[in-house]
């Protein structure tokens, strides 16, 4: 499924994350009997983007699972019933990516693209995670300049790679979340999301769940399967993040963020091959080898001499905007022409019309959810010197991302203490997981997926797809990979061993 305008607008918050809740050894049996027995109040979904007969409801969950008798919030869910009740197996939950980058409407449209045999086997259930969309939405009230993709993704603030502007932005943005985000901002994280998923399962009256989680949803799915292993039926983890990425002393989110270094490098050769092909109207160089030095020279020039770009945010085309635009294009090869057009214009000292900005409320909500999810897990470094050292090393080794994946986000100044250590994914549990992974993914590189595959051991089988872009199943994968996933969801037949799909 190709990206919607909403999803493209929120590529700035596509990524990874972490969590909180009841003891990490808790199982689904912790859901009270009264909750399991309480029927949901289903009603026709209000608003656009829903199919005929689609139903919506709200599942009440604790704001803070450490205080299960305290204040509750509502998590919005929607259901599309099985198209063939006689063969219905159960519920397939679509776990959205982001965090903060999807909606109930978007996930509903995605559910309707599933193959017929999957639509017959399951009631398709989608949800807005806590804080997002219709589920007690939050906002930090960021300044307009902080809504730019090059602000949330912390591209170094100057041509020399200085992190000083990023540290200042972290203080400003974290302060906005503390002032305006409300109490829920303290309780948005992956473990809380996992417990919400189990509350959804219980409210649906299901003993087990099947699920399809993409990108951040793959991480949330892995955490759910670790906390509630015997509540998992058929789990598909798509565009996988290294859930145990702890190169930064247990700071999982930083390790996942760092994946952009490798991911962009994995995709760039495909872009260079396309951008140097004879007959391409957007050809950038005579050879694939010539595309990289051309791009790096242009980005460096724009660092020194940005081009005014009225109506854009920021209002100039600088080196970081160019780098971010290339990264965005790598999520889907259909974005390659737009990136090439921007490069060609910049080489002439011009700019195309400014891109249409998404609704501010949408950005504010998505970035607030992403911020809380990133920052509420683990103790983030606060030292500018540490960030500067890592940025300098990254810029030298991975010039395409110019140090961004190692730089200070607003988490460097986050006002709330961490609640717990990240959940460590292990090989303990039933063998119910099928991983599907594109070989070249800018946000979820294959190297990270292989780490998760190794951690899961006998619990998983992985299908690696010879494709480029983010989202494999029904997205940027191929027919071989799609067939393997559909077969598993519909029949339970999983490849006997790890498989490569050309």
Image (tube, rainbow, N blue to C red):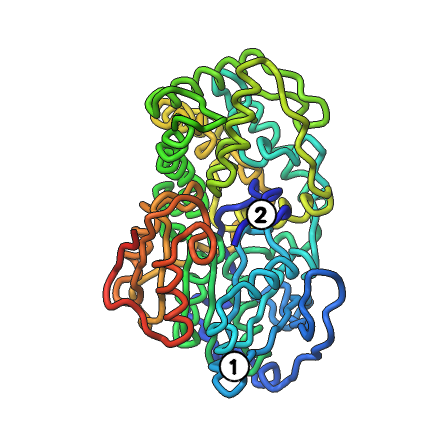
- Is 21 drawn above or below residue 202 in the view shown? above
Residue nearest the viewer, comparing 369 with 324: 324
In the rendered structure, the answer to whether residue 64 lies left or right of residue 206 reads right
Instruction: Please determine whether, in this image, residue 465 is positioned above or below residue 341.
Output: below
Q: Quadrant of residue 500?
A: bottom left
Q: Residue extending furthest left?
A: 497
**10 Å neighbourhood of mark 1: few (<14), some, or many (≥20)?**
some
**Looking at the picture, does residue 477 appear above or below residue 380?**
below
Depth order, front residue of 162/50 = 50
Q: Farthest residue toward the right?
A: 46
Mark carried by residue 226: none
| Residue for badge 1 | 206
Task: Look at 73% across and 43% down and name the residue there.
Answer: 359
**Residue visible at 52% across and 69% down?**
93
- Residue at x 52%, y 23% (from the top left corner): 343
Which residue is identified by label 2?
A: 370
In the depicted structure, whether residue 415 falls above or below residue 405: below
**Quarter of the figure with residue 255:** top left
Name the mark nearer the viewer: 1 or 2: 1
Q: Using the numbered discs, state the Cα–Cα distance from disc 1 to disc 2 in whole angstroms.
A: 29 Å
Q: Position of residue 246 (x, y in %)?
A: 36, 46
The quadrant in which residue 237 appears is bottom left
Q: Is residue 57 visible?
A: no
Q: Residue furthest front?
A: 279
The answer, for residue 418, to whether it is visible in the render is yes
- Which of the marked residues, 1 or 2, is nearer the chain's N terminus? 1
Could you say where residue 154 lies in the image, as x and y percent from the top left? 53, 32
Estimate the x, y position of residue 272 in percent, counting from the top left: 38, 29
Q: Residues within 10 Å of mark 2 (few under 14, many from 20)?
A: many
Q: What secondary structure is found at the residue carrying circle 1?
A: loop
Residue drawn at (37%, 44%) of the image: 445
């Amino acid at each position: 499924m190709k990206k919607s305008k909403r999803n493209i607008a929120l590529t700035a918050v596509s990524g990874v994350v972490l969590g909180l809740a009841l003891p990490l050894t808790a199982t689904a049996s912790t859901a009270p009997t009264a909750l399991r027995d309480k029927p949901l109040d289903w009603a026709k979904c209000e608003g656009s983007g829903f199919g005929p007969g689609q139903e919506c409801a709200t599942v009440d969950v604790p704001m803070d699972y450490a205080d299960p008798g305290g204040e509750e919030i509502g998590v919005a869910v929607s259901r599309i019933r099985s198209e063939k009740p006689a063969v219905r197996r159960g519920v397939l939950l679509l776990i959205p990516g982001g965090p903060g980058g999807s909606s109930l409407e978007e996930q509903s449209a995605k559910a309707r693209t599933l193959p017929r045999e999957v639509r017959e086997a399951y009631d398709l259930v989608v949800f807005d995670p806590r804080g997002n969309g219709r589920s007690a939405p939050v906002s930090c009230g960021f300044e307009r300049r902080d809504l730019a993709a090059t602000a949330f993704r912390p591209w170094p603030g100057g041509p020399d790679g200085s992190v000083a502007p990023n540290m200042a932005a972290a203080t400003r943005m974290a302060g906005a979340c503390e002032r305006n985000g409300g109490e829920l901002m303290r309780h948005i994280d992956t473990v809380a999301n996992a417990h919400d998923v189990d509350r959804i399962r219980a409210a649906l009256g299901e003993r087990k769940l099947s699920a399809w989680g993409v990108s951040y949803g793959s991480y949330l799915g892995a955490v759910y399967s670790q906390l509630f292993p015997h509540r998992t039926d058929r789990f598909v983890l798509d565009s996988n993040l290294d859930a145990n990425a702890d190169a930064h002393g247990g700071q999982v989110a930083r390790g996942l963020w760092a994946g952009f270094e490798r991911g962009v490098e994995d995709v760039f050769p495909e872009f260079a091959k396309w951008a140097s092909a004879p007959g391409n109207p957007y050809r950038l160089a005579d050879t694939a080898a010539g595309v990289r030095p051309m791009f790096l020279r242009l980005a460096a020039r724009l660092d020194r001499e940005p081009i005014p770009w009225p109506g854009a945010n920021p209002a100039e085309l600088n080196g970081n905007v160019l780098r971010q635009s290339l990264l965005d294009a790598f999520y889907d090869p259909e974005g390659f022409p737009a990136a090439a057009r921007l490069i060609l214009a910049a080489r002439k000292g011009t700019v195309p019309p400014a891109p249409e900005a998404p609704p501010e409320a949408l950005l504010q909500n998505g970035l607030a959810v992403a911020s809380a999810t990133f920052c509420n897990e683990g103790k983030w470094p606060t030292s500018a010197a540490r960030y500067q050292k890592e940025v300098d090393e990254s810029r030298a080794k991975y010039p395409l991302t110019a140090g961004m994946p190692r730089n200070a986000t607003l988490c460097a100044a986050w006002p709330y203490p961490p609640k717990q250590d990240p959940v460590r994914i292990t090989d303990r549990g039933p063998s119910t997981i099928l991983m599907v992974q594109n070989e070249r993914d800018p946000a979820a590189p294959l190297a990270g997926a292989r780490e998760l595959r190794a951690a899961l051991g006998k619990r998983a089988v992985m299908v690696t797809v010879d494709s480029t872009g983010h989202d494999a199943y029904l997205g940027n994968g191929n027919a071989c990979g799609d067939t393997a996933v559909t077969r598993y969801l519909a029949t339970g037949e999983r490849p006997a061993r790890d498989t490569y799909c050309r």
